[in-house]
Amino acid sequence: MVDGEAYVSRPRHSILSWPGTLIFLPVFSGILLVFDVAQRVARVFGQRPQEHVASALQVVLVGAFRLCDTRLLVERANEVRSSGSYIFVSNHQSMFDIPIIGALLRSNFPKYVSKRELARWIPSVSYNLRRGGHVLIDRGDASSAVAAIRALGERVRDGACSAVIFPEGTRARHGALGEFRRAGIGALLEAAPETPVVPIAIDESWRLLAHNMLPVPWGVRVRVRIGKPIARAPGEDRAALIVRVHEEISVTLGRWRDRTCSKRASGSASRLRRLRK
């Protein structure tokens, strides 16, 4: 089981977390400041140049976490083309999910559905959300939010970009998979009725920001699975499609976590045998 609070993984501790964080934080801050300026310069030449700079930003941010021995373990279906438009539907564990997806899918020009507050105070990230063609919503104004998401779906339908939506509506505590809110994803599906839907499962990214990066835990392995595109059909049951995507993400998380639990159990048994000798 991975829904609700059924899964709470064991925290990790390492004496390397604080030294790694002290190296990482100045590098991380510098990246945000440099790319904030770079995006503004690129924007002078149009949105597409700015988008390429923003893509580079996300690749560099993912790379910076290697200073804390963070690694991505990626499964990607061969059917997902490196170009073309998709509706990517992902579970959501931390703000770091955004650069992960942006780095892995940069040639698909993913556009995020994000809350308006994030567009105000984060160098580089906020500028990209404001000027990069993303959707900023006020969760207190449901009708305007749905209209903005529908407008993004129309751009996806026309092949201008891909959409990324986190239908849980908020970041999951300790990685637990929540229920999907259907209004936003339903608006995307309605506005782009022929665009394939791709489930994305992300796990362990919540650890990176669990303590607001004070410290960044050492040696986190973030798993990502970009699933097979789900073809669309006229007259489809959209509610059933949303359930199917949720189920696929849930099954993937369960597979990863069962494997992790088995390894831990095996390791504990081995240690116990050594102690008995």
Image (spheres, rainbow, N blue to C red):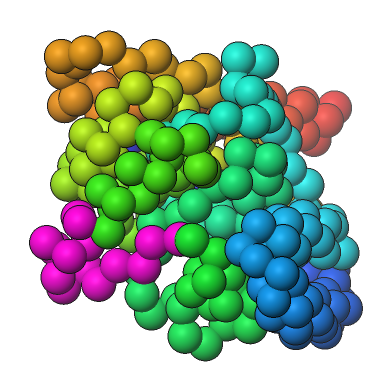
Q: Position of residue 215 (x, y in %)?
A: 69, 76
Q: Position of residue 7 (x, y in %)?
A: 40, 42
Q: What residue appears at the point 69 percent right and 76 percent down from the top-left corner?
A: 44
Quadrant, the C terminus: top right
The image quadrant of residue 90 is: top left
Q: How many marks?
A: 0
Q: What residue appears at the point 17 percent right and 46 percent down from the top-left corner?
A: 183
Tell me the magenta residue range.
134-147
| 245 w.r.t. 45: above or below | above
Quadrant, the N terminus: top left
Left-right relation of 187 to 247:
left
Whether residue 156 is visible, yes or no, is yes
Q: Position of residue 64 (x, y in %)?
A: 82, 64
Q: What residue appears at the point 73 percent right and 57 percent down from the top-left corner?
A: 52
Left-right relation of 24 to 222:
right
| 25 w.r.t. 68: above or below | below
Q: Position of residue 74 (x, y in %)?
A: 69, 32
The image quadrant of residue 124 is: bottom right
| Residue 138 part of the magenta-drawn span | yes
Pick the front one: 29 or 209 = 29
Q: What residue appears at the point 72 percent right and 61 percent down from the top-left corner?
A: 49
In this view, which residue lies farthest toward the front? 45
| Residue 178 part of the magenta-drawn span | no
Whether residue 12 is visible, yes or no, is no
Left-right relation of 82 to 28:
left
